[in-house]
Amino acid sequence: MCNSDGPQREAHCLYLKHRDMRQKAGQEENIKVNDANYMQEALKEAENAYRSGNFPVGALLVMKHSIIARSGNRERELHDPTAHAEILVIREAGRKLGTHRLPGSIIYTTLEPCPMCTAAMSQARVSKVVYGTRALRWTTTNLFNLVNVEIVQPRLNDGCRQIVQKWCKENGRNIFLDHSLR
């Protein structure tokens, strides 16, 4: 398209190239802003979980820039060890959309997903995961590579980590340092 037919054509091609680069940079910046906004919403769900006595993890499931489902951990409240925030948003989105497959969806979660949640995201065909802070008790980043899910790591690391540390301190646990806790 931009074969040089003289200095005017070459200048126009250079203009188009730079315009495209600026647009792409703007899109990438918008994605980062959206990630931060969605992560703030997930952090609100983690705070709700914390206030209700559950381990403070919050998650959102987003499709086409709309929040489809949101939840915090509810294990203690529901007496269900699988009631992790990520599992709950997958279940809610599935009910709302009438399907168990969620291609094109993005999960925003305040803590790196555990192996159970990673497997559920794979089964649901979640396309992307953005998490707030890492949990050194488990690392699932390599699992995501195996199941073909794009992962974006940490967003709002300090805020997400602080609420988990606060809960751990109050409950005599520390998932960041002690790998032996079960």
Image (spheres, grey):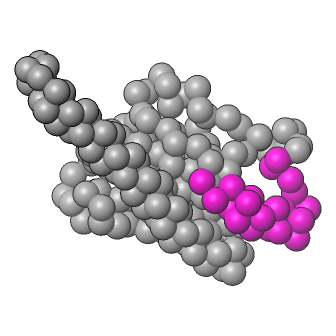
Depicted 71 relative to depicted 157: above or below = below
Decide if residue 108 is on the left or right side of residue 93.
Answer: right
Q: Nearer the viewer, residue 91 or 71?
A: 71
Q: Nearer the viewer, residue 172 or 29?
A: 29
Residue farthest bottom in this picture: 51
Report x, y in % for residue 84: 56, 57
> Quadrant location of residue 60?
bottom left
Q: Nearer the viewer, residue 32 or 109?
A: 32
Specify whether residue 50 is in view: yes
Decide if residue 76 is on the left or right side of residue 85.
Answer: right
Depicted 90 relative to depicted 153: above or below = below
Range of residues picked out in magenta: 155-176
Decide if residue 31 is on the left or right side of residue 110.
Answer: left
Which residue corresponds to the image point at 27% horizontal and 44% vertical from the top-left? Answer: 19
Task: Report the quarter where the C terminus lies.
Answer: top right
Report x, y in % for residue 66: 30, 66
Which residue corresponds to the image point at 13% horizontal and 32% vertical from the top-left? Answer: 8
Report x, y in % for residue 128: 41, 43
> Quadrant location of residue 115?
top right
174 inside magenta stretch = yes
> Quadrant location of residue 109?
bottom right
Report x, y in % for residue 138: 71, 37
Which residue corresponds to the image point at 12% horizontal and 29% vertical from the top-left? Answer: 9
110 inside magenta stretch = no
Helix, strand or loop: magenta stretch = helix
